[in-house]
């Protein structure tokens, strides 16, 4: 078979003379995936750092163009694999806008969506904190983080049927109501999380080695961050309080009471603290969402042009059978138009620009992956630092290569 | 089993060697996509791959016995995977983790290599998208079984 790829750079001599070129990655324990950084180094100091991306290019946007609107969500969920529900929700919100059914999404579905988003945020930050700790030599935090993550994934498995890509959020609502016993398990988890978060904080926040490695490392000024298009916790670590949940509320976030944690320092330690504070805020939102879940109700829009009719009606109603057949065999059609929808994923502003030409398949889906823009900042903040600090910077920007390369 | 004074055990050297080898299969730290997160989960407390003696994820292919291809292999990543495999010392084993690594999965398109077995030999395939950590543990078990039954892995197995 033909493999199209640039061979790994064998050059060890740079143009400027005294420096040498070093390839870091794409297989490296601390690049959080398949990132290659072409470094120009002067002894231990980084002169330039060029992130080389594309080692995980999957053609997701192109593949989605060949699938029905509902099927496309399956591949889209696999972009940011640490927060699959964020992708699914963002896409579903966009398609709902195009269909003009945003106002008709049942309230219970919206509450569960918020709950899912925040659980996902917690799980994602757990992975970030665990791996960030490992990069800096703090091994035990990894075990604590993944233990908490397992608890969250168990809930996710109960509601969506899969640990990582549940495909639970659908256009028009959710794929079924929460299962029996879910709320009791959620209550148990809510009780457990705050103590766990205190533990995580206790392991690293005041640790002198961790502080030495992260304070004043990877300084990102607010202006620089905005220029690079950095969003999410990395931006808020530089003192800019921009959060899509507050700026452009979606799926009812304006009715929840929570704060946007920010820090002024702009270094890796500030970004670490912002993420920890954000986890506390997520717990607050989850608690509020839990209180609203006591009242039962529908979780899917009552419109058989978009949502499958209830299973029990199919054998009784001719109309339901026809709708079922049409939806399964050719999907629904979306009126022509384009829309940009953004949500706050754990990494920042995740956006989809969706174009429809009236067919039953998307004409074009363009992603604005937060990781990609955050990763760009690496080029600006790496020069002048040590190679060892580069690992800290990558970790503190928290890129996920599924969505950088897609 | 504790041996008292004057007691001794007899075993074939081959069996002892295989037992030792199968109890210390060291994987390579190579995460590609979603499956890599589940690969990390097996090292975490709930699944704990240390029970099988495989918790030592090595960052250098020279020190690794097992390559877990965890996720979709993009065209650009293919040569890298191949090179890493070539750099591993024999005997070596490969687990193809997940639908994408095994067959391209849902990504039947221009960007993804349709099965990593088109570029390197694979010993065990794990289905799932992504497979559960239990699935991966079972795959490591199968590799251990192959070793105990005398499998050599890598180039030697195919000589």
Image (cartoon, helix red, strand yellow):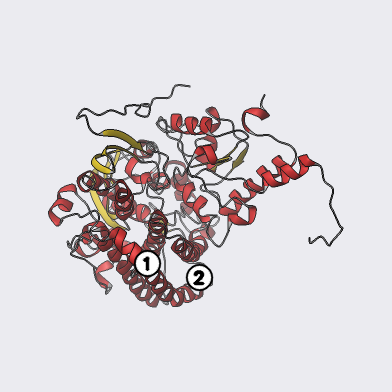
Q: Is residue B115 something that shows in the picture?
A: no
Please give left or right for residue A147 compared with residue A256 in the image. Answer: right
The foreground one among A134 and B43 is: A134
Can you give x and y, in whole percent of width and height, for residue B53 in the image? 62, 52
Q: Residue at x 63, y 36 (%)?
A: B123
**SS category of the residue bearing label 2:** helix
First in sequence: mark 2 vs mark 1: 2
Image label count: 2
Picture quadrant of residue A109: bottom left
Q: Residue at x 66, y 42 (%)?
A: B143
The foreground one among A207 and A406 is: A207
Q: Which residue is mark 2?
A: A182
**SS category of the residue bearing label 1:** helix
Note whether A78 is above or below A214 in the view shown.
above
The chain containing the residue under callout 1 comes to A
Q: Which residue is mark 1?
A: A204
Q: Is residue A279 something that shows in the picture?
A: yes
Numbered badge on residue A116: none
Can you give x and y, in whole percent of width and height, for residue A14 in the image? 25, 29
Q: CA distance from mark 2 to mark 1?
A: 32 Å
What is the residue that sits farthest to the front in this orientation? B6
């Amino acid at each position: 078979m033909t493999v199209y790829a640039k061979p790994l750079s064998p050059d060890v001599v740079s143009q400027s003379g005294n420096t040498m070129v070093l390839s870091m990655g794409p297989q490296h324990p601390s690049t959080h995936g398949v990132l290659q950084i072409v470094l120009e180094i002067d002894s231990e100091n980084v002169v330039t750092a060029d992130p080389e991306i594309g080692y995980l290019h999957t053609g997701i946007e192109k593949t989605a163009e060949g699938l029905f609107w509902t099927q496309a969500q399956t591949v889209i969920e696999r972009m940011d694999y640490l927060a699959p529900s964020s992708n699914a929700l963002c896409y579903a919100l966009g398609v709902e806008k195009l269909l003009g059914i945003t106002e008709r999404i049942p309230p219970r579905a919206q509450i569960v969506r918020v709950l899912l988003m925040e659980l996902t945020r917690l799980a994602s930050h757990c992975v970030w904190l665990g791996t960030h700790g490992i990069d800096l030599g703090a091994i035990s935090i990894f075990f604590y983080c993944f233990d908490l993550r397992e608890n969250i994934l168990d809930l996710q498995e109960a509601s969506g049927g899969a640990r990582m890509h549940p495909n639970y959020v659908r256009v028009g609502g959710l794929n079924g109501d929460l299962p029996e016993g879910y709320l009791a398990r959620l209550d148990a988890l809510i009780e457990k999380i705050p103590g766990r978060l205190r533990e995580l904080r206790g392991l690293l926040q005041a640790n002198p080695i961790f502080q030495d490695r992260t304070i004043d490392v990877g300084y990102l000024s607010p202006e620089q961050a905005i220029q690079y298009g950095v969003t999410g916790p990395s931006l808020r670590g530089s003192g800019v309080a921009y959060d899509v949940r507050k700026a452009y509320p979606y799926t009812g976030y304006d009715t929840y009471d929570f704060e946007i944690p920010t820090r002024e320092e702009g270094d890796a330690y500030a970004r670490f603290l912002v993420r920890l504070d954000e986890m506390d805020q997520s717990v607050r939102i989850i608690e509020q969402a839990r209180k609203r879940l006591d009242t039962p109700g529908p979780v899917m829009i009552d419109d058989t042009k978009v949502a499958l009719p209830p299973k029990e009606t199919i054998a009784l109603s001719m109309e339901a059978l026809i709708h079922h057949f049409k939806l399964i065999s050719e999907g629904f059609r979306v009126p022509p138009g384009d829309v940009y929808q953004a949500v706050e994923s754990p990494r920042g502003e995740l956006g989809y620009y969706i174009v429809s030409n009236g067919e039953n398949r998307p004409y074009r889906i363009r992603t604005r992956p937060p990781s990609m823009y955050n990763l760009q900042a690496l080029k600006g903040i790496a020069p002048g630092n040590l190679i060892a600090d580069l690992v800290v910077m990558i970790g503190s920007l928290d890129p996920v290569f599924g969505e950088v390369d897609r | 089993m504790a041996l008292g004074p004057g007691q001794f055990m007899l075993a074939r050297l081959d069996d002892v060697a295989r037992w030792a080898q199968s109890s210390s299969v060291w994987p390579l730290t190579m995460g590609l996509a979603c499956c890599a997160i589940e690969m990390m989960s097996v090292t975490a407390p709930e699944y704990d791959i240390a029970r099988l003696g495989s918790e030592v994820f090595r960052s250098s292919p020279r020190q690794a016995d097992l390559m877990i291809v965890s996720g979709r292999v993009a065209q650009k990543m293919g040569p890298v995977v191949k090179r890493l495999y070539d750099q591993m010392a024999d005997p070596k084993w490969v687990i193809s983790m997940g639908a994408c690594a095994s067959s391209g999965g849902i990504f039947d398109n221009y960007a993804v290599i349709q099965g990593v077995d088109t570029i390197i030999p694979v010993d065990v395939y794990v289905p799932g998208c992504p497979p559960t950590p239990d699935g991966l543990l079972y795959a490591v078990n199968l590799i251990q079984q192959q070793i105990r039954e005398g499998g050599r892995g890598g180039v030697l197995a195919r000589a």
